[in-house]
Image (cartoon, rainbow, N blue to C red):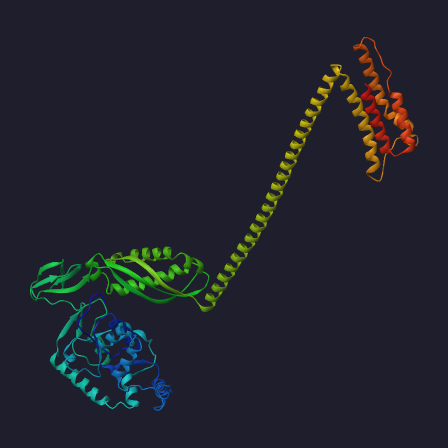
Amino acid sequence: MSTFEPVIVIDGKGHLLGRLASIVAKQILNGQKVVVVRCEQLNISGEFFRAKLKYHAYLRKITRFNPTRGGPFHFRAPARIFYKTVRGMVPHKTARGAAALERLKVFEGVPPPYDTKKRVVVPQALRVLRLKPGRKFCTVGRLSHEVGWKYQDVTGGEEKGEECSILREKEGSAETVGGREEIGGCGSEDEGEACITSYFQKSPSLPANTIIRFVPQQTAWIVERMGKFNRILSPGLAILIPIIDRIAYVQSLKESAIEIPSQSAITADNVTLDLDGVLYTRVVDAYKASYGVEDAEYAIGQLAQTTMRSEIGQLTLDHVLKERANLNSNITQAINEASQAWGVVCLRYEIRDIHAPDGVVAAMHRQVTAERSKRAEILDSEGQRQSAINIAEGRKQSVILASEALKAEQINQASGEAEAIMLKAEATARGIDAVAKALSAGQVNAQQAVSLSVAEKYVDAFGRLAKEGTAVVVPGNVGDMASMITSALAVYGKVNAGQQQALSHTAGGASSTPPSENVVDQVIDAATRGTSEDVAKTVLDGFDQARGRR
């Protein structure tokens, strides 16, 4: 409800107990004050015997809260049964629920002052609209009477007396409601349900002709003069002619929501779905909405259901689940094409819930699980592949870096060795150059030093061969020590001969006898008597003597 009335008086006659209780629970939670009368005329679907068995089974239920009484306490009065039903549908233990229950009043019969107030019905809870023809039902009053309630006759007499008084007061009178005439008195059960104005429907009671009327904003009043359409009253002040002018229809120009009940539809792949939705409409032409269709809301609701079935039949289950937006757009377009003559435009249609069979839902869950498992395995394999690639790349980089490091090391080592060789060669070259300069200068001491150095190196090499290693490479004449020493001193002799020639040239032809023969004799004698060390020492001593004499 968009606005709240001070108090809503609901006539419980002909309503289903559970459905009316759920609607009343919502209203009182929203802050609406509700009074329910004639609770003994509420209906319970099903056979009376089954309802009686359920009531007694509830009374015999053993609980730990009242073990001595043998079962939970349950009211017998119809009004209290309805109250307890509503109480079970609200959070009565919270402050909000307790405040909501304070806004609810329930009665058997119609006590004053509610006997003079207008009562309403709730179409969503009426038995004649909710139960299929032929379904069995019973009244709460009969059930209460069978379980011990003793006031059925009292409330029945009050109801009959009230109906008789209403008939006497309004005999022959008729009240126009929603463009239809309804008898003020209520005789039979069907007449009683028809004579009460529906509050929860959007067809409120029509305003009376009081000559001067004020039309509310976003509202259009259709005025008929002597039964014929005269004009449409716009918001503001309106002057009506008494008796001949009558307000026949009241159309709200606001956007309204129509709840589409759940219905079954079969998809293109033969899957039965239960769908419900909400349809948003607006009256754009008050004249067509009043005279173009008997009940625009009902007609649009039925059209929405048939259109939705037609659209669902063209799609498979997967497309229905994935293309809700397109489905809603197609339904809206089809409704607008069919409702042009009604003066009502459909703004949008929204599918609220889609219920598939349990087997299909289970199959969808298995499909989703399999898809998730597949994606997980793919991601796992991709991770392993990427990991192997990363490991291989790492090994490759490490090998490349190691080879580059080895290459750099070898290059650096070669560069060092080359530089060392170059430095050594340069040093050797400088030494040779110095020796060559000394020899070219004709210095006697330099030539003798060269001869002595050559002999020392020759002898020292053979001395190291004798000391180091187990395998020794010796000349072919190793048995003849004298000849070996003679060959060792041959170099010195040649060098000494060159020295003598140089000295003879420098000294004007003067020559001296070389002491090579004496030295040879000393070396041979030492070789026959001692070791290689003695031989070397003897050779060196001979060289020193010769050098001293010179």
Of residues 221 and 71, the one nearer the viewer is 71
Residue at 85% across / 27% down in the picture?
539
Of residues 33 and 71, the one nearer the viewer is 71
Residue at 23% across / 68% down in the picture?
201
Of residues 29 and 455, the one nearer the viewer is 455
Q: Quadrant of the N terminus?
A: bottom left
From where the camera sits, is residue 16 visible? Answer: no
Going by the image, does 189 lie left or right of 512?
Answer: left
Placement of 324 over or under 209, stated as above or below: above
Q: Position of residue 518 (x, y in %)?
A: 89, 22
Q: Name the residue at the front extreme.
A: 549
Q: Quadrant of the C terminus?
A: top right
Residue at 59% across / 50% down in the picture?
388
Q: Position of residue 112 (x, y in %)?
A: 15, 82
Placement of 283 over or under 117, stated as above or below: above
Residue 179 appears in which quarter of the rendering? bottom left
Of residues 93 and 83, the one nearer the viewer is 93
Going by the image, does 92 lie left or right of 112?
Answer: right
Q: Position of residue 163 (x, y in %)?
A: 17, 82
Residue 411 appears in which quarter of the rendering? top right
Q: Position of residue 489 (x, y in %)?
A: 86, 24
From where the camera sits, is residue 223 visible? Answer: yes
Residue 53 appears in which quarter of the rendering? bottom left
Going by the image, does 278 lie left or right of 465?
Answer: left
Placement of 388 over or under 157, stated as above or below: above
**Number of callouts:** 0
Q: Name the residue at the top extreme.
A: 508
